[in-house]
């Protein structure tokens, strides 16, 4: 019979040989790991599509802002012209000659004697007299003066230029 020590000795080399054979290096073909193309292409396509849509939205908003600015500029120009017209009308209404004419039509008369006032003490220095218009000397107003022609030119008149009629070829007219 074999002794247990002999069995261990004979078993150890066999285990070692098996381990050595398993531990030997051998060339293994390399497997390439490829990234999936579909997610990458989808991501790039979505980014491009998002960029194009973003640019279109930005361009549209800029055009709308441009139209709004143009509209507001036109409105500002019209309001400026209206303001100038109203200022001119106000100047005509404030004209002293016109004010005097309107006052005379309403029965008002100019004061005859000026009354001095002491501004430091806040007193009237003399007694005011009633304003009366003598029947022999009514208030004479100068007629409103017109501006000189150089300052108030007549509007220009533009006459359309007549073009000679073209000779039409005989036959039906094209529609």
Image: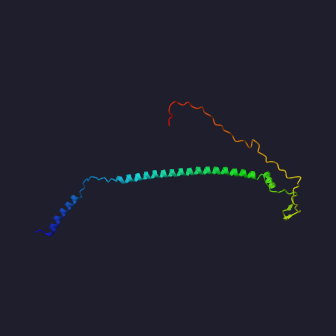
Specify the color scheme: rainbow
Q: Is residue 133 left or right of residue 50?
A: right
Q: Is residue 22 left or right of residue 109?
A: left
Residue 1 to residue 149: above or below: below
User: Which residue occupies 69% across, 50% down?
Assistant: 85
Name the quadrant of the N terminus: bottom left
User: Which residue occupies 60% across, 51% down?
Assistant: 72
Percent across and percent down for residue 83 are: 68, 52
Percent across and percent down for residue 138 are: 86, 52
- Would you identify the image quadrant in which residue 107 lies? bottom right
Percent across and percent down for residue 133 are: 87, 56
User: Which residue occupies 67% across, 51% down?
Assistant: 82
Please, which residue is most extreme toward the left here?
1
Front residue (pair 124, 38): 124
User: Which residue occupies 15% across, 67% down?
Assistant: 7
Q: Is residue 8 left or right of residue 54?
A: left
Front residue (pair 122, 18): 122
Residue 124 to residue 57: above or below: below
Numbered label tally: 0
Percent across and percent down for residue 131 are: 86, 58
Front residue (pair 175, 50): 175
Q: Is residue 54 left or right of residue 27?
A: right
Residue 15 to residue 68: above or below: below
């Amino acid at each position: 019979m074999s002794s247990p020590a002999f069995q261990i000795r004979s078993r150890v080399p066999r285990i070692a040989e098996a381990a050595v054979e398993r531990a030997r290096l051998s060339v293994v073909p390399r497997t390439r790991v490829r990234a999936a193309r579909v997610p990458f292409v989808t991501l790039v396509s979505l980014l491009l599509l998002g960029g194009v849509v973003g640019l279109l939205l930005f361009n549209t908003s800029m055009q709308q802002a441009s139209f709004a600015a143009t509209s507001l500029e036109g409105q500002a120009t019209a309001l400026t012209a209206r303001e100038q017209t109203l200022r001119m009308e106000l100047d005509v209404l404030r004209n002293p000659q016109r004010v005097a004419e309107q006052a005379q039509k309403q029965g008002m008369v100019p004061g005859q004697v000026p009354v001095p006032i002491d501004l430091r003490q806040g007193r009237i220095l003399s007694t005011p007299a009633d304003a009366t218009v003598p029947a022999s000397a009514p208030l004479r107003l100068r007629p409103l003066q017109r501006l000189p022609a150089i300052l108030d030119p007549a509007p220009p008149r533009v006459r359309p230029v007549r073009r000679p009629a073209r000779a039409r070829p005989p036959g039906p007219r094209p529609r």
